[in-house]
Image: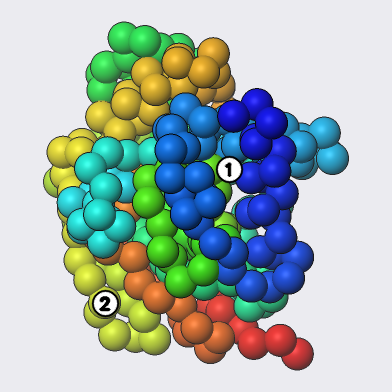
Amino acid sequence: MADNTLKYALHLEQAMEKRLGVEPLTSLDPAITMREAYRVQLHSVEKKVRAGVRILGKKIGLTSAAMQQLLQVDQPDYGHLMDDMVVENGGSIPFSRVLQPKVEAEIAFVLKRDLIGPRVTPLDVLLATDYVLPALEIVDSRIADWKIKLQDTVADNASSGLYVLGGKPVKPDAIDLPQVGMVLYKNGEIMNTGVGAAALGDPAACVAWLANKLFEFGISLKEGEVILSGALSAAVNAQPGDHFLARLAHLGEVQVHFVAEQ
């Protein structure tokens, strides 16, 4: 795989350069492993960092039964959040920034101390969290038509696109995170609803999973990082002109608008 890491990373980069989805890595190399896929992801992230992009946190994907069923996988994955992925709450996203976006509502954790695996518990996560916020994640795929297997999304930075933080900071001990209700609207119409427990039973358990998973790669979660803990329901397709709004109980609102090119 050492010779293929660069090749596969460049293969995914071509999608944004050409504005066209590419063939799945699992079609090019049916034997590609999860560890190899994460190596492709880390190669791409390190390349961006060398170019001046900053890592702001991590995202956890495929934590809900709805998303696992949608993509036919049976475990979560993770990706990196970069400073070129941030969208202001209530802001607009030109469609040139995305390929085939879908929108998810999530709970975001902002850490006040490091979390280092391999034995991190949900309680450790709560003690290390400064506050939580409502978030929208715009997932995207460089793979044509979202024809992905788990290794494909992992290599593709867990199908990361953009993200929006909203609402007001709330201390994690002030609310019951598994019981936080969510309603996601598209153009004023309710698309789906969810609850914190949809993400591995507890959003804090998702962050604990991430900290322990990262230990395998010699990576830890850092003070100040933003952690998107996973979708609370299935992702919703987005098109130019669409407006998305999520309301999360006790956490407030977060919204974004997709716009066509001027």
Mark closer to the chain start, 2 or 1: 1
Residue type at mark 2 is Met
Res. 191 mark: 2
Q: Is residue 239 above or below residue 253?
A: below
Q: Is residue 152 visible?
A: no
Query: In the image shown, does 236 or 38 lie closer to the viewer?
Result: 38
Is label 2 in contact with label 1 (beta carbons under 8 Å)? no
Q: What's the distance in space between the residues labelled 2 and 1, CA to CA?
A: 26 Å
**Left or right, 20 with reference to 114:** right
Residue at image location 37% in from the left, 18% down from the top:
212
Res. 81 mark: 1
Q: Is residue 54 above or below residue 220?
A: below
Quadrant in which the N terminus is drawn: top right
Q: What secondary structure is found at the residue carrying circle 2?
A: strand
Q: Callout 2: few (<14), some (14-19), or many (20+) C-alpha neighbours within 10 Å?
A: some
Picture coordinates of residue 90 (x, y %)? 55, 70
Residue at image location 64% in from the left, 73% down from the top:
20
